[in-house]
Amino acid sequence: MDEKIKTLQQWIDESSAVVFFGGAGVSTESGIPDFRSVDGLYNQKYAWPPEQILSRTFFDAKPEEFYRFYREKMLCLAAQPNAAHKKLAELEAAGKLRSVVTQNIDGLHQLAGSQRVWELHGSVHRNYCMKCRKPYAVEDIKDGQGVPKCSCGGTVKPDVVLYEEGLDSATIEGAVSDIRAADLLIIGGTSLAVYPAAGLINYFRGNRLVLINKSPTSYDDRADLAINLPIGEVLGQIAVR
């Protein structure tokens, strides 16, 4: 085992309130594309840039085009939890992990068994009528055509945070509270480039900050331990005890 991973194991063993903060890199090992890598969605070609398609202005103006992109690129319902998701769920069940704070919208943490998950950017698994708030399953969206409509006639919108929309205040408050109370904060699979989500780590008051990402980040020099490997490869070697 790599010396850095041995150190991580020791720190987890010595901690009782671990919080994990994760980004797109946690799910790429499950086959879900990220946004900013060479092969990510932001580097593919569409009639409009993905960041424009995923804005509230675009959703309101061109819902048909939004849903064409959304069904094809954002709904990866066949994806399964990987070693990182599973190990985090095991650590929570063992009483070591306080919660998961995630920028992902795929629901894989819950599928792996995690109970306390703060989804900063929402979830594809929740969809609501904008008029009457009736809920709809993700399968209703995936299997439908065009713009999904509620039985009341309203437009159904995914409960995901689009560009130009604010983050849910209760989710932010919960994530901040847990990060502030953590004795070990593990950040994995994120370049920490997306704000305001990335700014949440500034609330950490614990002693040990760990960064796990395939490539270096601008925050590596602030970490007590930086590991430049895939998050699943790292957490897959951690023993739960």
Image: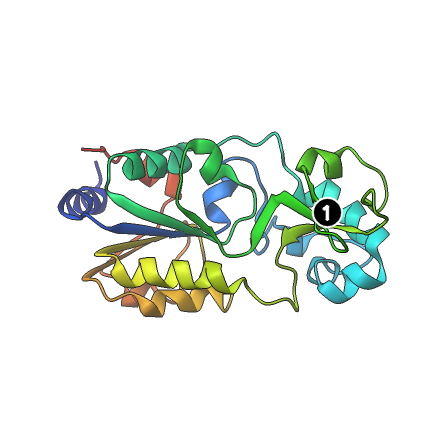
Residue at position x 83%, y 47% in the image: 152
Quadrant in the picture for the N terminus: top left
Q: Quadrant of residue 92?
A: top left
Task: Give coordinates of residue 220: x percent, y percent.
Answer: 32, 63
Residue 77 at least partly seen: yes
Residue drawn at x 36%, y 45% as measured from the top left: 229
**Relative to 55, does residue 189 appear above or below in the rendering?**
above
Q: Position of residue 218 (x, y in %)?
A: 39, 67
What residue appears at the point 57 percent right and 56 percent down from the top-left corner? 36
Quadrant of the rendering where the C terminus is positioned: top left
Q: Please tell me which residue lies in front, 78 or 123.
A: 123
The residue under label 1 is: 70
Q: How are the residues colored?
A: rainbow
Residue 26 lies in what quarter of the image? top left
Residue 187 percent across, percent down from the top left: 35, 54
SS label for mark 1: helix
Looking at numbered disc 1 in the image, what kind of residue is underneath it?
Tyr
Does residue 112 lie above or below 3 as drawn?
Answer: above
